[in-house]
Amino acid sequence: MKIAILSRGPRLYSTVRLVEAGRERGHDISVINTLRCYNNVTSHRPSVHYRGEALHGIDAIIPRIGASVTFYGTAVVRQFEMMGTFPVNESVAISRSRDKLRATQLLARKGIGLPVTGFAYSPSDVDDLIKMVGGPPLVVKLLEGTQGVGVVLAETYQAAESVIQAFMGLEKEIMVQEYIREAKGADIRCFVVGGRMIAAMKRQGAEGDFRSNLHRGGTAQVVKVTPEERSTAVRAAKVMGLNVAGVDMLRSNHGPVVMEVNSSPGLRGIETATGKDIAGRIIEFIERNARVGRTGTRGKG
Ligand code: ADP
Ligand code: MG
């Protein structure tokens, strides 16, 4: 098959592993810089151009869209969908997962366990907002943050109030969440491919940090998940419409609560912690499912 990885980082671990795994299995794999794709939007023969040529005959794309380029990146994925190219994750699913609030609302609709979460616009409503989500300590999150940046723990009422008001003053979109203290700075990352959880790791934040992101100095180890955690991960990926997803959850006193669902989950941490060939499983998924014209949305919103 002819498979293109949409990525700005040909030397990133995840990209390198996907290229390797694809070539091992006999596919024609290329890495395409998402931001260098330029596109002809037309109803008759929509096309994606790259370095002076129209791209032809690609069976599947693996979008690895960085958070800072979600808007342009998902537009390029949508363009491929219009051409009938099979995307491992569809543009609309990527957009859903990138907005933490939209994702949380979608998960809530389907009864997935979540930390108590609220949002407000006006500084006048901050006092009630804090009470509504159960009071401090609270976690305040930028809706489009990633890798732990923009996630703040406010231990006291005053801290919560001033952090929320500061973000509001900067016109940053935020949500406010119950702090799951019993998770003790650790979370569970479940890797889901094609409706099955294929690997899981426990990430522990660096000393003194409540955030367990590996980019923040967290460490990962393999973990055995409960059946409830496994089914929560699979259901969360399904609700988002993601074929490949990293579902992050906390072990709370009332069962697993999902924090976010990542549409371009990194491979380094999970492959290193578990010793599994995750890249190979993604390529296998493409082999089983990629057919021209077999995208759910064909580029619709
Ligand atoms: P990011 O997209 O930046 O990774 P997350 O929502 O995943 O944002 O939060 C980053 C980390 O902060 C999580 O991996 C988790 O360790 C910690 N965290 C986030 N929300 C909560 C919460 N409600 N209670 C306790 N810890 C949390
Ligand atoms: Mg996260």
Image (cartoon, helix red, strand yellow):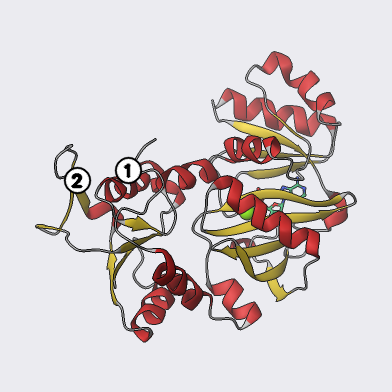
Residue 119 shown left or right of residue 70 in the figure: right
Q: Quadrant of residue 143?
A: top right
Q: Quadrant of the C terminus?
A: top left
User: Residue at coordinates 64% horizontally, 60% vertically from top-left?
Assistant: 213
Marks 1/2 in contact by CB < 8 Å: the verdict is yes
For the residue marked with disc 2, what is the amino acid? Answer: Asn
Q: Position of residue 17 (x, y in %)?
A: 43, 77
For mark 1, does the 10 Å Cα neighbourhood hold few (<14), some (14 to 19), or many (20 or more) residues? Answer: some
Res 149 seen here: no
User: Closest to the observer: 236 or 200?
Assistant: 236
Q: Say which mark, if any, is on residue 106.
A: none
Q: Secondary structure at mark 2?
A: strand
Residue 74 shown left or right of residue 38 in the figure: right
Which residue lies most toward the right here? Answer: 253
User: Closest to the observer: 260 or 81?
Assistant: 81
Task: Relative to 41, say whether 8 is above or below.
Answer: below
User: Residue at coordinates 77% horizontally, 42% vertically from top-left?
Assistant: 115
Circle 1 residue = 75
Task: Relative to 254, say whether 135 is above or below.
Answer: above
Circle 2 residue = 39
Q: Position of residue 245 (x, y in %)?
A: 56, 58
For the residue marked with disc 1, what is the amino acid? Answer: Ala
User: Residue at coordinates 57% horizontally, 77% vertically from top-left?
Assistant: 271
